[in-house]
Image (tube, rainbow, N blue to C red):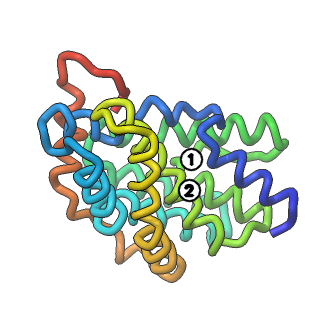
Amino acid sequence: MSFSAQHKLMAWLSPSYPIGAFSYSHGLEHAIENGDVINAAHLRDWLADVLQFGSGRNDAILLSLAYKAQTDDRLSELTELTEALCPSAERYLETTAQGRAFCKVTSDVYGTDLPSLSLPVAIGAAASDEGMDLADVLPLYLHSFVANIISAGVRFIPIGQTEGQKVLYELFDVIEDVAKAAMTSNETELGSACFLGDIASMKHAVMTTRIFRT
């Protein structure tokens, strides 16, 4: 990638990029409240499953497909597929609200013309437009995705920030494997087996007290 493209990708995936990522826990808040995730080891295992068998894997495949898309109609189709794969209203909120915010901010800052897309589709399309290397974008997207959920765990379990970084480090190999597989995956390989995570995202919506939006 060019020096400029590297900077743009770092900006897009930074916690400071104003898409509101910090306010989402991806159902983790309920899992913690319910006692399913109570320490760093639990958090690592929970996220490894999300990456390998759940929404992390799906997002990587959808990003890859969006990167290769040739038309706006194809991007719209992939966005509809992303939304259809959401197992709960909160997961739908995560991908649509963050996607809209990403498209708006990126268009305003960089002068692009992104339509309203789901988050992984938007990043895939923008990365392709900028000539970024998909092999670089995929693992860094998953890194950012996991790091945001770890941040929620650090605040709510709570665990120390150093422990949070250890969890992230222990997921590096998983991230690389999922990203590599997504490079050549297609729609037929989409799907999720993270049932507890999906249920947690549903039950989070009816929690009496909530810190995170999801």
Secondary element at tag 2: helix
| 133 in relation to 46, above or below | below
Mark 1 and 2 residues: CB-CB less than 8 Å, in contact? yes
Report whether 186 appears left or right of 66.
Answer: left
Residue at horizontal 42 percent and vertical 55 percent from the top:
166
Q: Which residue is found at the position 35% from the left and 69% from the top?
A: 190
Q: CA distance from mark 1 to mark 2?
A: 6 Å
**Quadrant holding the C terminus:** top left
The residue indicated by pointer 2 is: 121
- At which x and y percent is residue 207? 18, 23
Quarter of the image with the N terminus is bottom right
- SS assignment at label 1: loop
Residue 68: x %, y % from top left: 63, 72
Q: From what the image shows, is residue 144 above or below residue 89?
A: below
Q: Position of residue 192 (x, y in %)?
A: 26, 63
- Number of residues whose C-alpha sits closer than 10 Å to that of mark 1, classed few (under 14), some (14–19) or many (20 or more): many
The residue labelled by disc 1 is 117
The answer to whether residue 18 is left or right of residue 87 is right
The three-letter amino acid code for the residue at tag 2 is Val
Q: Residue furthest top?
A: 208
Q: Is residue 136 above or below residue 59?
A: below
